[in-house]
Image (cartoon, helix red, strand yellow):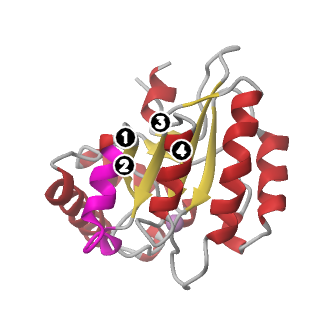
Amino acid sequence: MPPAVVRCAEVGDRRLLALSFDDGPGDWTEAILDLLERHDARATFFVLGRQIAGREATLRRALAGRHEVGNHTWSHVRADALSETELRRELERTSEAVRAATGVDCILARPPYGADAERFAAVAKRIGLAPTVLWSVDPEDWRESSSAAIVRSVLEDAHPGAIVDLHDGWGRTPQSRQPSVEALGELVPALVSRGYALVTVSELLAA
Ligand code: NI
């Protein structure tokens, strides 16, 4: 039985690592899928329900490419600002939108800002979303850091079993994710050359 909230995985000396992308699908998701495909790498996308309309094909493409789609709520509100009923509705609406777009059920969930994670996990689990997934490597790409800073941060902190938090969309304030896309173009080959296999979060947790 895995813990209710995970930040990384125990994989011994197996060099497995999970890239994750939050707040999409967005204008940068297709470019990220292109890059991942080029290197035969897998990732996990924690999507916002409100972002799905008009981007259903992007979600289908991600799943067809053996990436994973998780639930990041409908509107990116901190869980501690919501009643249990409101939080549950945020999650249910998003899972319904993913299912309608792809025919696939979300398994994993991630709380916006990582906030109130234990309570979020309890509510998510009651509607079949478990575990709740945080991260162990945080390059803070949401600050629109330079791509070089993102690359440096991830490569410094990467470890077997790591879950890396990146962004292909935005939570509250519209921002460009071009630095994240550019960083990924360097990161994926750099991680592969360091011997890492890039897998989905569920694959990492099952290892
Ligand atoms: Ni987010």
Q: Is mark 1 within 8 Å of ligand 1?
A: no
Query: What type is the residue that disc 4 sits on?
Result: Leu
Query: What type is the residue that disc 2 sits on?
Result: Ala
The residues tagged by marks 3 and 2 sit, at their Cα atoms, a distance apart of: 11 Å
Disc nearer the start of the sequence (4/2):
4
Query: What type is the residue that disc 1 sits on?
Result: Gly
Disc nearer the start of the sequence (4/3):
4
Q: Position of residue 180 (x, y in %)?
A: 66, 62
Q: Are marks 4 and 3 in contact (CB under 8 Å)?
A: no
**Magenta span: chief secondary structure:** helix
In screen coordinates, is 158 left or right of 71? right
Question: Tag 1, which secondary structure?
Answer: loop
Q: Nearer the viewer, residue 90 or 159?
A: 159
The residues tagged by marks 1 and 4 sit, at their Cα atoms, a distance apart of: 9 Å
The residues tagged by marks 4 and 3 sit, at their Cα atoms, a distance apart of: 12 Å
Specify the label residue 62 is tagged with. 2
- Start and end of the magenta stretch? 49-63
| Mark 4 surroundings within 10 Å by alpha-carbon count, few (fewer than 14), some (14 through 19), many (20 or more) | many
Q: Is mark 2 within 8 Å of ligand 1?
A: no
Question: Tag 2, which secondary structure?
Answer: helix
Q: Are marks 4 and 2 in contact (CB under 8 Å)?
A: no
Q: Which residue is mark 3?
A: 200
Quadrant of the rendering where the N terminus is positioned: top left
Q: Which residue is mark 4?
A: 36
Q: Which residue is mark 1?
A: 65
